[in-house]
Amino acid sequence: MKKYKKSESDNINYNQEIENAINIYEKTIGHFASRTRTMIENYGNIGALEALMDNADIQKGFKTLRDKNMLDKTFEAIIVKYQDKITFKKEAVAVAKFRLENPRWDEII
């Protein structure tokens, strides 16, 4: 896995939305999202979300929230929402947009 650095921007208001997304995901799956929380602890919010977008596989959290009709609670939605306020890599934004526009692409392949 690539190393992602914590950013100074990690202290912006979107942190609460990320925490809310994780809490919703945890309630949906019925247990603690330890991998996600560890990634955030290690890389910060920006680094963790970018790392998740850097993976060709659609993440379990995205699939779970998609299947519950909660795409607006995904990390992808948060990246797109805050793309003009947070310095996300352009590739991460592009992947987030693609996944939101094509939420079931993994079922076509």
Image (cartoon, helix red, strand yellow):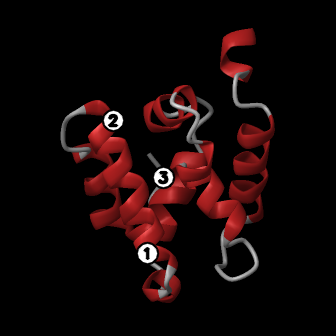
Camera-side residue of 50 and 79: 79
Question: Which quadrant of the view contains residue 38?
Answer: bottom left
Residue 50 can be seen, yes or no: yes
Answer with left or right where residue 30 lies relative to residue 59. left
Q: Which mark is residue 2?
A: 3
Disc 2/disc 1 C-alpha distance (Å): 20 Å
Q: Residues within 10 Å of mark 2 (few under 14, many from 20)?
A: few
Assign a secondary structure to mark 3.
Answer: loop
Task: Kindly identify the residue that appears in the image at 80 percent across and 39 percent down.
Answer: 101
* 23 up-or-down from 31: above or below: below
What residue is shown at x 45% (from left), y 59% (from top)?
Answer: 48
Q: Residue at label 1?
A: 15
Given the image, on which type of amino acid does mark 3 rest? Lys
Q: Residues within 10 Å of mark 3 (few under 14, many from 20)?
A: few
- The answer to whether 84 is drawn above or below residue 72 in the figure is below
Q: Secondary structure at mark 2?
A: helix
Q: Quick one: label 2 or label 1, which is nearer the N terminus?
A: 1
Q: Report the mark closest to the observer, 1 or 3.
A: 1
Residue 109 visible = no
In this picture, is 34 found above or below 7? above
Q: Residue at x 54, y 25 (%)?
A: 67
- Mark 1: which amino acid? Asn
| Residue drawn at point x = 51 percent, y = 30 percent | 68
In the picture of the structure, the residue carrying the numbered disc 2 is 28
